[in-house]
Image (cartoon, rainbow, N blue to C red):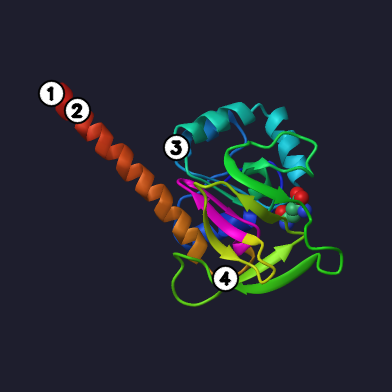
Amino acid sequence: MLALQGDFREHVATLAALDLPAFEVRTLEQLDDADGLIIPGGESTTIARLLLAFELREPLRARIASGLPVWGTCAGAILLAKRAPGLDRPTLGVLDITVERNAFGRQLDSFEADLEIAGVEGGPFRGVFIRAPAIVATGPAVEVLARLEDGSIAACRDGALLATTFHPELTNDLRLHALFAAMVEERLDEAQERRVRAEELTA
Ligand code: GLN
């Protein structure tokens, strides 16, 4: 759990409810120990600044390039984006999406909406949107998982990268955290298979 700023504690509590081992990441050593990373909601400008100040931006980009599963919620989704025109600091620039910050105007600063999310069974997911960004464009490799009524994208995925513009950690619904845990598990299984195959080759 990236714990530089934002509501990382709520995510850790949600992961604990699923009996998943989670720890806070603020240093390079902690990042090295992580098998997956959640970037929480908060203030994307602040998190972007702290990623640079803690010298985590480049190492994190390198881990993502080698397949680290990362889920960005709200501000976290902004940080994953390749294009975030409303942010005056560099994002991680790893997910082929364009995000518009604070896309829902003042009186709609916060709202809730029921979402149908591809791959999440069992009925709609209550999305809590807080000064949320909108994902307004995606590259060809990005799979759209959920849209709002205005057509803007609320959830999408490209391989091991997941982005949601709302806050599942503020509900009691554990399904998206379980989905991300499955993505991490999948990645660990693949790595294990590769190790076994490499051992077989050298045996
Ligand atoms: N408006 C915030 C930003 O642009 C995001 C809000 C959130 O994470 N809930 O960083």
Residue at the limit of the structure toward the front, as seen here: 140
The residue located at (60%, 62%) in the rendering is: 169
Q: How many marks?
A: 4
Say few, some or many: other residues with alpha carbon within 10 Å of mark 3 (under 14 / 14 to 19 / 20 or more).
some
The magenta stretch spans residue 165: yes
Among numbered discs 1 and 4, the one appearing first in the sequence: 4
> Which three-letter amino acid code belongs to the residue tagged 3?
Gly
The answer to whether the residue labelled 2 contacts the one labelled 1, judged by CB atoms less than 8 Å apart, is yes
From this view, report whether residue 87 is shown above or below residue 154.
Answer: above
Between the C-alphas of marks 1 and 3, the distance is 27 Å
Which one is closest to the eye, mark 1 or mark 3? 3
Which one is closest to the eye, mark 1 or mark 4? 1
Residue under numbered circle 3: 67
Residue under numbered circle 2: 199
Residue 64 locus on image (x, y percent)? 51, 35
Between the C-alphas of marks 2 and 1, the distance is 6 Å
Query: Quadrant location of residue 58?
Result: top right
Residue under numbered circle 4: 172
Label 1 SS? loop
Residue 68 locus on image (x, y percent)? 47, 39
Residue at the limit of the structure toward the top, as seen here: 202
The magenta stretch spans residue 102: no
The one nearer the camera, 155 or 180, is 155
Which one is closest to the eye, mark 4 or mark 3? 3
From this view, report whether residue 151 is shown above or below residue 54.
Answer: below
Label 3 SS? loop
The answer to whether the residue labelled 1 contacts the one labelled 4, judged by CB atoms less than 8 Å apart, is no
Which region of the structure is painted magenta? 154-168
Between the C-alphas of marks 4 and 3, the distance is 29 Å
Residue 171 locus on image (x, y percent)? 61, 69
> Which three-letter amino acid code belongs to the residue tagged 1?
Ala
Residue under numbered circle 1: 203
